[in-house]
Image (cartoon, rainbow, N blue to C red):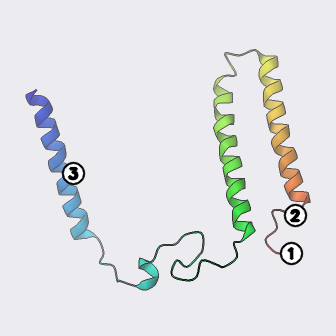
Amino acid sequence: MIKIMLSMTTAMIISTLLMIMCTTISKSTTMDREKMSPFECGFDPKSTARIPFSIQFFLIAVLFLIFDIEIAIILPMTTTMKTSMTMNWSITVTLFMTTLIIGLYYEWKTNMLEWYK
């Protein structure tokens, strides 16, 4: 019990010292309107909320989510390669990769990835 209390006290002292050191060493920031205002989706939060939303921003966000999920699915595939049947594993990976490539080809051909038209 004493060891737990001693380790918790030591951790609290170290974290407090680190916080104090960071505040004394850090640079002083200037209070600027641009730096102090929140930045959300490229909009100025102090202006009107009735400005049109850019569909390109939405498209890039959706593409990021799709490829982020793709990575989360592909990474475990490499670890299951040794434990699963080779034919089933290769068919699954081939179908998954083909679907992603066809989707990317479709986006490319319909000019969804173009910023300027």
Residue 101, image x, y percentages: 84, 45
Q: Which mark is residue 66?
A: none
Q: Quadrant of residue 27?
A: bottom left
For the residues labelled 1 and 2, the Cα–Cα distance comes to 9 Å
> What residue is pinned by disc 2?
111
Image quarter hosting the N terminus: top left
Q: Nearer the viewer, residue 111 or 46?
A: 46
Q: Are marks 1 and 2 in contact (CB under 8 Å)?
A: yes
Label 3: state its secondary structure: helix
Which mark is nearer the camera, 3 or 1?
1
Q: Residue at x 14, y 43 (%)?
A: 10
> What residue is pinned by disc 1?
117
Q: Are marks 3 and 2 in contact (CB under 8 Å)?
A: no
> What residue is pinned by disc 3?
15
Q: What is the crowding at mark 2: few (fewer than 14 residues within 10 Å), some, or many (at least 20)? A: few
Label 2: state its secondary structure: loop
Amino acid under disc 1: Lys
